[in-house]
Image (spheres, grey):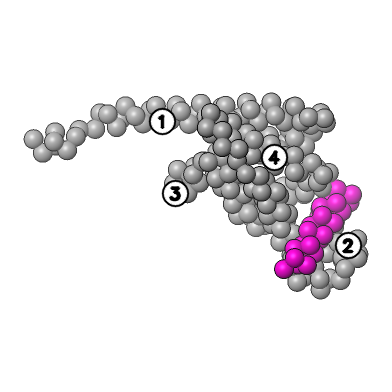
Amino acid sequence: MAKKAHLSRHIVDTAIKLAGEKGWRATTMADIAAAAKISLADIYSVFPTKADILRGFTQQIDEVVLAVEPDGDEGETHRDRLFDVMMRRFDALIPYRDGLASISRDLRGDPVAVAVTACSFRRSLGWMLEAAGIPSDGIAGALRIKGLGLVYLAVFRVWLKDDSADLSRTMAALDARLRQAEQFSNSLRSRREPRRRERPSESDVTA
């Protein structure tokens, strides 16, 4: 199992590096095998398609992000914890920035690949919510995942061009987006509460 995990990481790292050098669309499985100094059969045994490599990369980053235990600070808000979790992700992505820039460009013209990778992306968003102590199940969870996806994609575009040493532009964009999302969520909640209060009680209905 450890050997397969090492092979998986080696293939993923090689593939993303090549994407940064020659473009994701132009990178073939044969290119990856040659650069990684392994056979095509080795790649096929772990990742039968290039989309599978992207899913493997997403899982690899998820594991890095989720490996950090929460500090248990009860004074932190959900937004504070979510900010920390998402910045851990952007920090983990730094070595792969050139490759991810290429992949994000090439995927725009490949709706099939986008559809294939969308499932793993949604799963990652759900796990980031859970890591921040925010439920991701049910209808409410699905809405949170959708909202977080919009936040992540907007900040990801800033991150791609953020050349600051401490990712200050990324942090500022993430903080602003999370505040907007929180304000929107609070406004929806405040609209629902009066309606709940206006509903007749059971005793009123049966009186």
Check disc 4 and give the amino acid type. Answer: Arg
For the point 32% across and 27% down, which residue is it?
194
Check disc 1 and give the amino acid type. Answer: Arg
Which of the two discs, 1 and 2, labels the residue nearer the N terminus? 2
Residue identified by numbered label 1: 189
**Could you tell me which quadrant the C terminus lies in?**
top left
> In this view of the protein, which residue sits in the foreground, 105 or 117?
117
Residue identified by numbered label 2: 36
For the point 71% across and 54% down, which residue is it?
60
Q: Is residue 108 above or below residue 167?
A: below
For residue 35, side relative to residue 143 (left or right): right
Which of the two discs, 2 and 4, labels the residue nearer the N terminus? 2
For residue 199, side relative to residue 16 (left or right): left
Q: Secondary structure at mark 3?
A: helix
Which of the two discs, 1 and 3, labels the residue nearer the N terminus? 3
- Numbered tag placed on residue 88 in the rendering: 4
